[in-house]
Amino acid sequence: MPSNETIIHCPPALRAQWGYGLAQDWRRQYPDVFDADDLRLVKTQSNRHFPEWFAAIHLFHRDGVFSLVEKYGCANHLRKLAVWEALFSTTQRKTLDKICEDKNVQGPDLLAYAPDRSRRFFAEVKGPGDRLSSDQIATHRAIAKYSGIPVEIIHVRLHSSVVS
């Protein structure tokens, strides 16, 4: 496995709990990681986003970083947009947007950053059965090459012997 790939294990019973209630609990436990917009997305798309949330919590514990879960460059997600604009110059944001536009893919799932904003990286999260597309791979390579910002691939795997 390449050095920029990580596998994290999740108990199936925890995955089975996913929904608005668990998301509310995690929002309360990790207020600097998840916001009202994240919670709203879970409410409207309850069968999605679990791997991203689980990976964001993993990164918080592993690296002490906060994460923006998707939509970090969108104008209607004000808190995320403010962080995005604080972490990247206008030129950097345009470059990152252009890289994604060229392959017609969204940016990586998570934008992780230190609380003091001294470091940042992206993470693409793949849940059970998900695979990277060739366009995503090319985009991640271009992001690392042209911005110097790494993209970690995090695979969330269900594993019944994991203690929650």
Image (tube, rainbow, N blue to C red):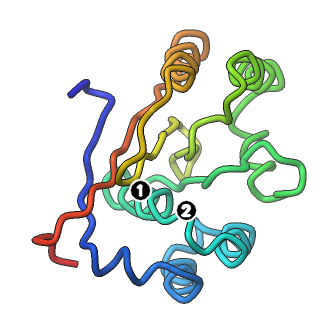
Give me the disc on residue 49. 2
**In the picture, residue 41 is in which quadrant?**
bottom right
Crowd tier of the residue under label 1, counting other residues whose Cα lies within 10 Å: few below 14, some 14–19, many 20 or above: many
Give the mark nearest the N terminus, 1 or 2: 2
> At which x and y percent is residue 56?
46, 58
Report how far apart the C-alphas of labels 1 and 2 lie in the structure. 10 Å
> At which x and y percent is residue 18?
47, 78
Q: Residue furthest right?
A: 75
Q: Residue at position x 77%, y 18% from top?
A: 98
Task: Look at the numbered disc 1 and give the secondary structure of its residue.
Answer: helix
Task: Look at the numbered disc 2 and give the secondary structure of its residue.
Answer: loop
> At which x and y percent is residue 52?
49, 57
Viewer-proximal residue among 70 and 57: 70
Q: Residue at position x 72%, y 74% from top?
A: 44
Q: Are marks 1 and 2 in contact (CB under 8 Å)?
A: no
Q: Residue furthest front?
A: 129
Using residue 147 as the reference point, say whether residue 55 is left or right of it.
Answer: left
Crowd tier of the residue under label 2, counting other residues whose Cα lies within 10 Å: few below 14, some 14–19, many 20 or above: many
> At which x and y percent is residue 131?
41, 37
Viewer-proximal residue among 29 and 8: 8
Q: Residue furthest left?
A: 161
Question: What residue sits right under mark 1 in the picture?
Answer: 55
Q: What type is the residue that disc 2 sits on?
A: His
Viewer-proximal residue among 32 and 133: 133
In the image, is residue 77 above or below residue 143? below
**In the picture, residue 135 is in which quadrant?**
top right
In the image, is residue 78 above or below residue 111? below
Using residue 29 as the reference point, say whether residue 164 is left or right of it.
Answer: left
Q: Residue at position x 51%, y 73% from top?
A: 30
**In the picture, residue 77 is in which quadrant?**
bottom right
Q: What type is the residue that disc 1 sits on?
A: Ala
Quarter in which the N terminus is drawn:
top left
